[in-house]
């Protein structure tokens, strides 16, 4: 099928149109908190515990009676542990007759084991004691709904009395690799064959952002086989990715198949790489026909698939940190298109410099050396060396090497 550029829209418009037609199913599950790192809470979670249950020591030390210190530091040479004082380490409760704690740094014992106290201590009722509920009270809000659980959240949930937590179910994303030339990972390709390598990139991206990938075997370029696999995937998954066959090659059947089965389709976007991408709704589920080249696959993952996964989890699309960098190479792109420029950022003195990873580089360099993206906007064709551009980081600044 041919593509009509007059029907193209921007990537933002395509995603907005898709989202306006898609209401993801909200499924939840309860899972052990030991397995909850990175999952998204579906409800507000409130404490079941009050801690301390009664009281506890705020520091390592000894608990004493404050009345014994009303007239200064007493003579403690005859004091007996368990009678005149008790050990009270951080978090410990102790007998009610003791009402103050002296830090262990101010406590010592002489050669005969007799207690000695520093002259700098100040002992008053309640000193260094955590009262009932000072840590948490039953009913306190522990974690809000729509929180991506991080290690501190899990600590708070455990403190509040939770062994399990209710989270949104992971979206099931079906991935259908297509193409008669493709062979599975681990196969030595013969002439005319190519490794199906996009699948591992799709899987890692989907799982990184909270989804679960269902990968189908490679489907050859046969319309009815493609249709059968597509219908099975729609019945199984929450969203479907068909990789390949979105353009107008002789065996690019997927775009026509998706158009035929869809209630809505947007075929073509003003963004390169990835221009022939198709976004569609089939049986109330989103179906994305992703172009086959890996750079286009990466682009679609970034601006379409990852935001879809996040929407399913009731989360906003991720926003990357950006840095200003001095462009080192000319960019010449089609004016009506956004351009996903792959950038190798490097440090030079007190600034960042941006090297454009063009098709003059080999595939490994274009993929592996890329640590930033420059999304060149619609309307402008040329960007010249020496210009300052805004680069989205694909890594932490600490990993950017020196030029």
Image (cartoon, rainbow, N blue to C red):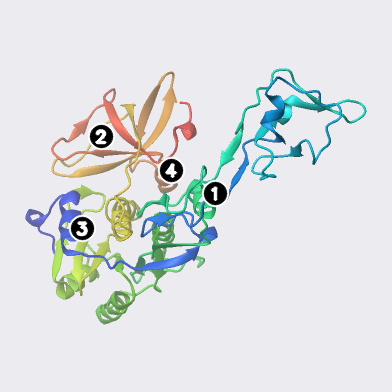
Could you say whether the residue bearing mark 3 is in a helix, strand or loop? loop
Residue 62 as seen in the image, left or right of residue 287: right
Q: Mark 4 sits on what residue?
A: 365
Image spot of residue 48 (x, y percent): 48, 57
Nearest to viewer (mark 4 / mark 1): 1
Name the quadrant of the N terminus.
bottom left
Residue 235 visible in rendering: yes
Q: Nearer the viewer, mark 1 or mark 3?
A: 1
Q: Position of residue 386 (x, y in %)?
A: 29, 22
Q: Secondary structure at mark 4?
A: helix
Q: What separation in Å lies between label 4 and label 2 (alpha carbons)?
A: 18 Å
Which badge, 1 or 3, is on the more N-terminal residue? 1
Residue 293 location, quadrant: bottom left
- Residue denoted by label 3: 276
Disc 2 vs disc 1: which is toward the camera?
A: 1
Q: Residue at x 27, y 55 (%)?
A: 304
Q: In the shown orientation, is residue 82 left or right of residue 327?
A: right
Of 192 and 147, which appears nearest the observer?
147
């Amino acid at each position: 099928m041919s593509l009509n550029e007059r029907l193209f829209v921007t990537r933002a418009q395509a995603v907005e149109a898709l989202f306006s037609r898609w209401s993801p199913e909200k499924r939840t599950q309860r899972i052990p908190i030991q397995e909850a790192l990175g999952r998204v809470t579906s409800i507000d979670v409130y404490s079941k515990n009050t801690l301390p249950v009664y009281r506890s020591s705020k520091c390592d030390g000894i608990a004493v009676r404050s009345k014994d210190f009303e007239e200064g530091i007493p003579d403690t040479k005859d004091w007996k542990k368990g009678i005149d004082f008790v050990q009270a380490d951080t978090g410990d409760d102790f007998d009610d007759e003791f009402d103050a704690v002296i830090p262990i740094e101010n406590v010592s014992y002489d050669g005969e084991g007799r207690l000695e106290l520093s002259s700098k201590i100040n002992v008053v009722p309640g000193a260094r004691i955590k009262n009932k509920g000072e840590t948490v009270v039953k009913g306190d809000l522990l974690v809000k709904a729509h929180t991506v659980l991080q290690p501190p959240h899990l600590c708070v949930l455990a403190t509040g009395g939770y062994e399990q937590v209710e989270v949104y179910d992971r979206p099931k994303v079906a991935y259908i690799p297509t193409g008669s030339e493709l062979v599975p990972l681990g196969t030595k390709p013969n002439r005319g064959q190519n490794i199906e390598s996009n699948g591992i990139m799709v899987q890692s991206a989907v799982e990184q952002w909270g989804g679960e990938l269902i990968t189908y075997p490679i489907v050859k370029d046969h319309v009815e086989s493609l249709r059968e696999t597509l219908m099975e995937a729609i019945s199984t998954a929450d969203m479907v990715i068909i990789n390949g066959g979105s353009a107008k090659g002789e065996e690019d059947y997927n775009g026509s198949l998706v158009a035929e089965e869809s209630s809505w389709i947007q075929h073509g976007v003003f963004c390169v790489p990835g221009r022939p991408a198709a976004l569609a709704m089939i049986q109330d589920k989103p179906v994305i026909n992703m172009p086959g080249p890996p750079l286009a696959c990466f682009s679609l993952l970034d601006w379409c698939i990852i935001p879809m996964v996040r929407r399913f989890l009731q989360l906003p699309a991720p926003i990357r940190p950006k840095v200003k960098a001095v462009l080192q190479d000319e960019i010449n792109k089609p004016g009506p298109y956004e351009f996903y420029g792959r950038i190798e950022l490097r440090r030079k003195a007190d600034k960042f410099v941006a090297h454009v990873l063009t098709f003059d580089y080999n595939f490994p360099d274009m993929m592996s050396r890329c640590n930033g993206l420059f999304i060149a906007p619609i309307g402008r064709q040329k960007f010249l060396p020496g210009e300052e551009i805004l680069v989205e980081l694909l890594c932490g600044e600490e990993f950017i090497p020196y030029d």
